[in-house]
Image (spheres, grey):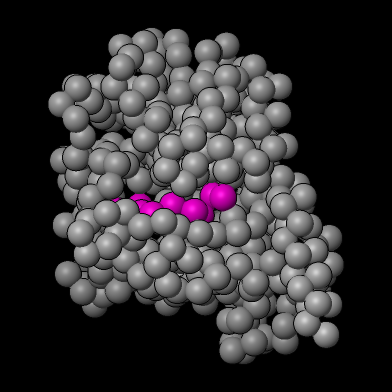
Amino acid sequence: MSSVDLIDFDPLTVPDELGHFGEFGGSYVPETLVTPLAELTAAYREASADPEFQEDLERELREFAGRSTPLYFAKRLTEQLKGAQIYLKREDLLHTGAHKINNVVGQLLLARRMGKTRIIAETGAGQHGVATAAGCARFGLKCVIYMGAEDMRRQALNVYRMRLHGAEVRGVEAGQKTLKDAVNEAMRDWVADSRNTHYVLGSALGAHPYPMMVRDFHRVIGRETRQQILEQAGRLPDEMAACVGGGSNAIGFFFDFLKDESVRLVGVEAGGRRIHPGEHAARFSGGRLGVLQGSKTWLLQNEDGQIEKTHSVSAGLDYAAVGPEHAFYRSLGRIDFSSSSDDECLNAFQLLSRCEGIIPALESSHGLAYAVRRAPEMSPDQILCINLSGRGDKDVQEASRLMDAVENLRKENE
């Protein structure tokens, strides 16, 4: 299928019953997880068709998570960049500080419906972990969070927040001590105790039904954006962009616009220090097709199939694979992909803070960095929407350390 076929294509027809988005996705898991995943798939499809479940979900998103979120016209940023009108979808204003709570609320309601009493999750930047811990406190569920030791160092504030909500945070010392390693440990835990435990996977990746399920729980972002931009501007945006690690915020933001061919959709990956093995996490710039943690997709691996080290200034984008639905729409030519470097990200982090009084997450700053490059290329009557997926309180200390290091290096070279 090519981009010209999209007008006749219904996004709701993917994935298929086996979880495939074209050649991507699927379920590549140990035999011990085949039955739990099948049970989860059946339970999710049943819940999706249950009006009572949907009413509970809508109520919890409204009363607990704080939906809806505003679509904010960034007037001063627009004036400074001298190009397109820039709108920000303010997922940073949600309870716990990021879009992650949308998926967490949905999965916890599903887990409770299935009779699960113990919840596990992985986290990189800590926002999914905090959302899961808060949700478990809300519903009275036991909670264990796996987090790489390096990410725990970078995101110490979020570690404390998780523990404050009553979660047990287990540091992972294996591998790079980041997100991929946390996912590995969470999957081992689930294999050992799937009868009582539900794994709240935090992004639109992994084995079926997770990419589909996480996407669906985040579609509320795009539905609201569509209604709000029509109310505020009287038309759809010309372009939309969002950061992409696994890709949950982006697919939720993009999904309800997929059939609008006039709207360009751009995912922004972590360019890191440079596009070189071990120096970045831009799967579409330096990766190849493979299988990782249950799913066939684009990932960073060497010629021998070994997973390459990744790097990003943001813990939440520091992952070797991308969600299979993103790989699928890229193959169709419907979603374009770019990347932002660490330096561009830190500059955008500061720019939005000073222009608009909004401190963005370092993950979201990758999308903002794209806007800084892209908006001046567009005309003043065009509209560029950016998904501000999270707030940057958690990143202030790490960003300060990195910016101080850059400044000290500059002084040394003078």
Res 156 visible: yes
In-front residue for pair 146/284 = 146
Residue 334 in the magenta stretch? The answer is: no
Using residue 209 as the reference point, say whether residue 18 is left or right of it.
left
Q: Is residue 199 above or below residue 202?
A: above
Q: What stretch is highlighted in magenta?
A: 315-328
Using residue 234 as the reference point, say whether residue 289 is left or right of it.
left
Residue in the picture at 70% in, 29% down = 161
Residue in the picture at 71% in, 22% down = 164
Q: Classify residue 203 by image quadrant.
A: top left
Which quadrant is home to the C terminus? bottom right
In-front residue for pair 341/259 = 341
Residue in the picture at 21% in, 34% down = 29
Using residue 45 as the reference point, say whether residue 240 is left or right of it.
right
Total marks drawn? 0
Q: In this view, does 355 lie above or below 314?
A: below
Relative image position of residue 38 (x, y in whole percent): 20, 26
Relative image position of residue 133 (x, y in whole percent): 59, 25
Q: Is residue 91 above or below residue 407?
A: above
Residue in the picture at 37% in, 35% down = 184
